[in-house]
Amino acid sequence: MCDSEDVCFEAPECVKSDGSDDFSRMLNNTDANTHRTEAWSNADSVVREPIEALLADPELVLELTDACQRMGEKNSDQVIQAFQRGLLARILFSCLIYADRIDSADFGKPIAARFRQHSNYVPWIDLIGRLENHLAQFAPEGKANGLRRQVSRHCLEGAERPKGAHRLQRGGR
C-alpha cells in the first residue's frame, strides 16, 4: 500500500478479471506511452552498464527463454501462459526490491552489514550437530527432561524413515 505522497512501484496485474492478458499488453505498450527510450537515454551509465551486461549474458537470456518455453509446453492456454509469465516477472521484481532493500540497509549500517552471510550459510548437518550437542548438555534428572530426551530420540529415529507424514507414539512405534 502506498501513501499519496510516495512513489509506488507495484507489479502489474497479469490477467484482468475479464481474462484478458494485461501483462503482455503492458509489455507491448508503445514507446510514446511509456517513454522507454527517453528514460533509457537519460539513465546514468552506472545504471545502464550492469543492465546491458545482464542482457548480453547468453546464459541469463537462455534461462529466461527456456523458462517461458517450458510454460508453453506445460499449458497451451494463452491466459494461463500470460499468468505464468506475469508471476515470473513478479518474482524477479520481488528479488530486485529485496536486493535493493538489503543494499540500502547495508549502506545505512555498514557495521551490521559485515554480519550478513550473503548465502554462505552453515550446512544443515552442522546445525543439527550443534543442536544435538546443546541438548546433550541438559541435566538428565527430572521427569520433564526424561520426556524431552524421549521425544528427541523418537524424532531422530523418525528422520531415518522415508519422507511422508509421521506421528510420534509412545513406545517409538
Image (tube, rainbow, N blue to C red):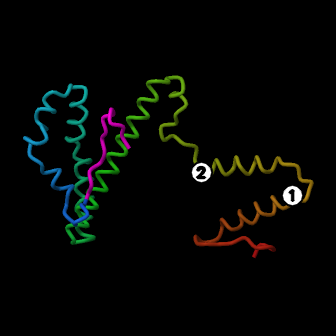
Is residue 142 or residue 83 the one in the foreground?
A: 83
Residue, far front: 4
Q: Residue at x 24, y 61 (%)?
A: 16
Q: Please tell me in which quadrant of the rendered image residue 22 appears.
A: bottom left
User: In the rendering, which numbered label is found on residue 124?
Assistant: 2
Task: Specify whether 45 is left or right of 110.
Answer: left
Q: Which mark is residue 144?
A: 1
Q: Position of residue 43 (x, y in %)?
A: 19, 28
* Percent x, y of residue 58: 22, 46
The local secondary structure at tag 2 comes to helix
> Residue at (81%, 63%) from the top-left corner?
150
- Residues 117 and 109: in front is 109
Judged from this view, the residue extending furthest toward the bottom is 173
In the image, which residues are magenta? 1-14
Distance CA(mark 1)–CA(mark 2): 28 Å
Q: Is residue 2 left or right of residue 13?
A: right
Q: Position of residue 3 (x, y in %)?
A: 36, 37
User: Is 110 or 78 nearer to us in this picture?
Assistant: 78
Coordinates of residue 82 in the picture (x, y in percent): 23, 61
Q: Which corner quadrant of the image does residue 149 belong to?
A: bottom right
